[in-house]
Amino acid sequence: MEKQSLRIFCCTPLPGFGHVLEQALGPGFEIASRKELCWPGPDRGHAWDVLLLDLQDPRDGFGLEDALRFLEQPSGGQFPLPVVAILGAEDRATSLRLMELGVLFPLLTPPDMVELRLALRRAHQFHRLERELHQARVEEHTVVPYSVVGVSGEMRSLFELAQKVAPCDVTVLIMGETGTGKELWARAIHRMSARAEQPFVGFSCANLPETLIEDELFGHEKGAFTGATSVRRGRFETADHGTLFLDEIGDLSLNLQPKLLRVIQERSFERLGGSQSVSVDIRMIAATHQDLSAMVAQGRFREDLFYRLNVVQLYLPPLRERRQDVPELAHFLLKKFATQFDKKVKRFSRFSLQAIEEYAWPGNVREMENVIQRAVVVSEGPTVELRHLPNQLRKGFSEAPVERSYEAEVREFKRRLLLRTLHQCGWRKTEAARTLGMARNYLHRLINQLQITPDQEGADSLPEEPRQHLPSKIM
């Protein structure tokens, strides 16, 4: 089937420029042009993919201030088109100002056609992913935890599995590092189940004395111990007809594990100090950052309890293993907190987004949530700047002007883009060339020109935390 052309809406004061550009770009691009700066409407029934601003000659067309005022205006749509600009002069300050206002790729005139094709295709990809993400959020009867936000196939497959599991009353074990969003996934499963209108009760077994955990889970009878002046219902009773989520189940003591196993098997228990059996109807979801199978082998976790909990397993990968999802998640959280705090923050600066993309995120989704929340709170204008991020993210970055030419900046951008894409494609150059929309020979030429080698793979990111020994297979 023939690949659909990219639909480019070009604002240019030069007569015939759109037609000339379409011929120069070659197959795969369709361009319509206007003589004034404007956000395109649904011309000819088209949904435009990219807005191209021709700022080559401010004397005959649009000046910088005109472009800045235009970019500040609302687009009239829910998802503003991604913007690519062609500049008439080498002006680093102008390029940076345009990028702060959302221009993804400012290029110099005359634009290199290979670079322009790449810029237009990448801009379209960003826009398409944003629309797909929005569609996933608004699907009827779908509850998406924000830790699933992203484009990686692994997360999509994980969510599809959660959707299949949710209507079935089976026990689910969620595994993943601290901060990966295990409770968010548990809540999503509950809300997609037949128990959605019933209670969701969560409890963490981490860092609590055994007696306190037992009391919290099972409750106690009056007089069970000193200070027990009345009957107290535990989490199991509170969650009756709903879902009980036990976080950090690996921290549960060996003495309490048989009691938990009995509740799962028989759906009944006795309160502390009592002899009367209490029956409950609950759905159990457990979570841990530890490798329970290894704990079973070490005698630290009951094998029969592990098998009871591990009916369906969801493994949540850390952010460092799905780096392609980091920008999407960051933008999602930015909009979330801007709405929550009634702030006018709309975007990240070039350097702040680059710092967010290249940080290792040892605290995963939870750490990013805290970082973006803080950045939104302290920001003064529409853009999150590098100075709004914590120190650990700002290492190696600076907002101060640096003594580098525009060519050096473009070279550095190309190097980072190629390194990241090659890494994502496992250094398969044919696949990387296809992903970038360029010829394989040209990719080889760029690799040689930029002196890129596989040993530079981690050169542009902070050291990653050692990966914990968690099962990567979803059962």
Image (cartoon, rainbow, N blue to C red):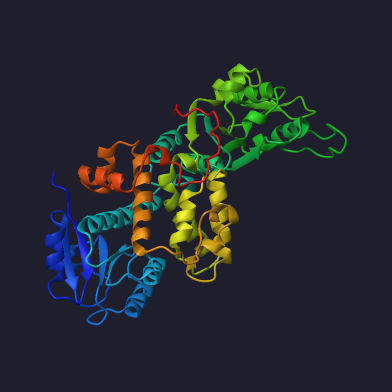
Left or right of residue 99: residue 398:
right
The x, y position of residue 102, in whole percent, is 38, 65
| The image quarter in which residue 237 lies | top right
Q: Residue at x 51, y 48 (%)?
A: 359
> Can you name the residue that lies furthest to the right here?
226
Count of numbered circles in the view = 0
Residue depicted at 58% across the width and 33% down the height: 289
Q: Quadrant of the C terminus?
A: top left
Residue 79 visible somewhere in the drawing: no
Q: Is residue 307 above or below residue 68?
A: above
Q: Position of residue 267 (x, y in %)?
A: 61, 26
Relative height, residue 120 to residue 147 (above, below): below
* Residue at the extreme bottom of the image, as rendered: 59
Residue 84 position, x and y percent, is 29, 64
On-image quarter of the N terminus: top left
Please give left or right for residue 97 compared with residue 435 in the image.
right
Q: Residue at x 26, y 62 (%)?
A: 50
Nearest the viewer among 429 and 306 is 429
The answer to which of 83 and 201 lies nearer the viewer is 83
| Residue 365 sits above or below residue 32 on the image | above
The percent coordinates of residue 288 (x first, y second) are 59, 33
In front: 379, or 269? 379
Residue 246 shows up from this direction: yes
